Image: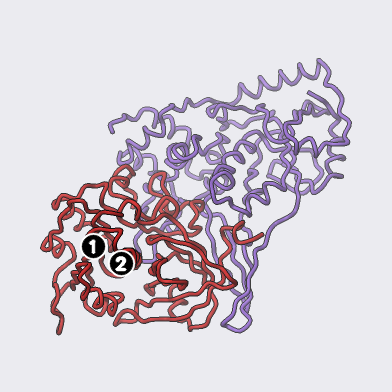
Chain colours: A purple, B red
């Protein structure tokens, strides 16, 4: 572990490019100190933005069309991701980069982002990252930092991180500082829960696809979709054309599986007509389907969905109840 | 970045020909030519996303066969925003096409075996592609038998072609309409009933079934009764789609995406998935 004064690192990062700092609210273009906890909005906003333009088209005469793709080619330093943010990017990469065909828009933004991860000193009450085999001090990203007061402890984890910090003089961390790290780490880790996800949860949920379990858990949900928008791993999107006189653009926006229109077909048929169907699909996607496809759950245990739900739906409770389901299949 | 690097960027295509298919104008066939030297290889059963710039994209099964040359054919029911705009389009207009997307009928498995095609209504598009493909490579397959029905004669797709097929001696074609119609001398009755009447042998035969959900529902038990095994019956599914690439999320059944892992599935494969259609 190396060390550097906070102000020095921030000055340096500012000189290296477009600096986006994670505040309590989320990422902002700023030179403030990064918040060493879970922000309100996740890093998803930075790699898969709420809306983005895919194509711009021109229709000069009602018959011909010309169009081209539009890329966000800004290079950004993302400063202060919490480990759960970094973990969520790993999960998004599975779908958008590692599964063919690669999503060129996501990939471009991802390659142009350097991830400076900051250990989470103050997990929230709803945090349960420990359930997924990592924690608030797990070393992730391109550069890993720990906020120990006036100083950041620094560890470079990738070539990208090395390139970012090139020219910055780092000192060796003092023993007292490493002791401080251990102290912060054990305090933070003691605050996050391990909800005990059963190893066979993917098959367990699958086997109970037609159980009344889903009606029971979906009962309080009002299908507002807040959980999916705040979720750092919910990536479902919509594609729409916007038309102006003689020109327009094709945009991609976040969508939510909690909305009826998400799967509503033109014929009027909807394969997921009720809140129960949609809740079931969301939970199964996270704890069954994603694992069957990619070997990992589509959840990082950040707890945002629990905090933002207007009716107190708690995904931790759902998993705990699922653990009690019988496997009948 | 080239189109190959961006799976969301369509290929420019010119609408060469529009053919009215149905007597109520609800179904038209659109023939496109890819522009700027583009060409892609595809197989019967695959689909494309067709762009009407300013309205959006919609997925359509490819109705042409790769053996027919460069024109891509889609038969489209006028139903929503994109399909209505397509129906209003004139020949010569420029559109966008992304594809080919999804998997295809397992033609390699079919080779050397008999093929039974059962279709209903306007779901006959990729079945046409399959039939034309088999007829073009006739010696590579065994018997070809086709049962195709619509509500009335004027709703059968590709009528001129159907009547040509009827004259061939290297395939059997059974056409049916739901009710008696003046001048109609072929089968009368729903597709499942005609299937039961015709009773094709399951021996060494693969079945491909496409049609409206109600037809599928009543056809599958008949096939089972005739002795067709689940791993030898194939169907093509559809759901609302956006990306066509297995990313946007909405067209899944269980962990399978219809756009990417499908649209063609065997009944045996479907049985492994949760009932979420």
Q: Quadrant of residue B61?
A: bottom left
User: Residue at label 2?
Assistant: B135
Mark 2 neighbour class, 10 Å CA radius: few under 14, some 14 to 19, many 20 or more: some
* Spot occupied by residue B36 in the image (x, y as percentages of width and height): 60, 72
Residue B221 % position (x, y): 17, 53
Secondary structure beneath dot 2 equals: helix
Residue B8 vs residue A325, the one in the foreground: B8
Q: Residue at x 44, y 64 (%)?
A: B59
Residue A40 appears in view: yes
At 39% from the left and 32% from the top, the residue drawn is A322
Q: Quadrant of the N terminus of chain B?
A: bottom right
Report the residue that reaches farthest toward the front. B139
Q: Chain of mark 2?
A: B
Residue A182 in the image: state x and y as whole percent. 71, 18
Do marks 2 and 1 both belong to one polypeptide chain?
A: yes
On screen, residue B120 versus residue A37, left or right, reads left
Q: Is residue A166 above or below residue B89?
A: above
When asked about the image quadrant of residue A250, the answer is bottom right
* Residue at screen point 75% across, 48% down: A76
The residue lying at 25 percent from left, 80 percent from top is B154
Work out whether B19 lies above or below A38. below
Q: Is A213 or A91 nearer to us in this picture?
A: A91
Q: Disc 2 or 1, which lies upstream in sequence?
A: 2
Give the residue number, with chain letter if any, for mark 1: B144
Circles 2 and 1: CB atoms closer than 8 Å: yes
């Amino acid at each position: 572990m190396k060390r550097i004064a906070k102000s020095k690192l921030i000055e340096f990062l500012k000189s290296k490019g477009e600096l986006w700092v994670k505040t309590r609210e989320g990422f902002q273009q700023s030179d403030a100190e990064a918040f060493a906890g879970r922000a309100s909005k996740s890093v998803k906003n930075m790699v898969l933005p709420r809306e983005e333009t895919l194509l711009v088209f021109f229709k000069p005469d009602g018959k011909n069309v010309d169009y081209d793709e539009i890329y966000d080619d800004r290079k950004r330093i993302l400063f202060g991701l919490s480990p759960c943010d970094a973990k969520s990017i790993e999960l998004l990469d599975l779908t958008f980069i590692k599964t063919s065909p690669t999503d060129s828009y996501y990939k471009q933004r991802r390659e142009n982002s350097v991830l400076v991860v900051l250990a989470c000193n103050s997990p929230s009450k709803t945090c349960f990252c420990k359930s997924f085999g990592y924690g608030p001090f797990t070393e992730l990203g391109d550069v890993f930092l720990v906020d120990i007061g006036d100083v950041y402890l620094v560890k470079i984890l990738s070539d990208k991180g090395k390139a970012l910090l090139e020219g910055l003089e780092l000192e060796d961390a003092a023993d007292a500082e490493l002791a401080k790290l251990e102290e912060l780490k054990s305090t933070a880790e003691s605050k996050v829960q391990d909800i005990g996800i059963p190893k066979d949860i993917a098959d367990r949920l699958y086997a109970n696809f037609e159980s009344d379990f889903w009606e029971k858990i979906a009962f309080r949900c009002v299908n507002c979709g807040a959980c999916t928008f705040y979720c750092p791993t919910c990536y479902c999107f919509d594609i729409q054309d916007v038309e102006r006189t003689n020109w327009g653009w094709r945009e991609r926006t976040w969508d939510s599986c909690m909305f009826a229109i998400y799967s509503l077909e033109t014929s009027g048929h909807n394969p997921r007509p009720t809140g129960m169907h949609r809740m079931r699909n969301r939970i199964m996607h996270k704890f069954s389907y994603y694992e069957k496809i990619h070997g990992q759950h589509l959840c990082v245990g950040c707890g945002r969905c629990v905090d933002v739900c207007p009716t107190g739906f708690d995904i931790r409770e759902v998993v705990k109840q699922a653990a009690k389901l019988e496997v009948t299949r | 970045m080239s189109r190959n690097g961006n799976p969301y960027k369509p290929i420019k295509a010119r609408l060469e020909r529009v053919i009215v298919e149905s007597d109520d104008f609800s179904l038209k066939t659109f023939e496109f030519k890819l522009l700027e030297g583009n060409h892609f290889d595809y197989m019967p059963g695959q689909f494309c996303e067709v762009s009407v710039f300013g309205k959006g994209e919609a997925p359509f099964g490819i109705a042409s066969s790769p053996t027919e040359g460069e024109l891509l054919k889609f038969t489209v029911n006028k139903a929503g925003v994109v399909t209505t705009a397509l129906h209003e389009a004139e020949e010569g207009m420029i559109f966008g096409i992304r594809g080919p997307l999804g998997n295809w009928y397992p033609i390699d498995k079919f080779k050397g075996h008999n093929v039974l095609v059962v279709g209903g209504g306007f779901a006959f598009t990729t079945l046409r592609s399959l039939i034309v493909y088999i007829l073009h490579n006739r010696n590579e397959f065994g018997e070809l038998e086709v049962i195709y029905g619509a509500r009335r004669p004027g709703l059968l797709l590709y009528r001129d072609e159907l009547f040509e097929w009827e004259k061939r001696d290297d395939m059997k074609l059974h056409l049916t309409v739901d009710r008696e119609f003046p001048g109609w001398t072929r089968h009368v009755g729903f597709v499942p009933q005609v299937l039961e009447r015709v009773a094709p042998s399951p021996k060494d035969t693969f079945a491909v079934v496409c049609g409206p959900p109600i037809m599928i529902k009543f056809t599958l038990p008949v096939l089972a009764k005739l002795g067709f095994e689940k791993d030898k019956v194939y169907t093509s599914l559809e759901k609302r789609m956006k990306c066509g690439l297995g990313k946007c999320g909405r067209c899944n059944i269980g962990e399978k995406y219809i756009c990417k892992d499908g649209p063609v599935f065997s009944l045996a494969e479907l049985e492994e998935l949760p009932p979420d259609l």
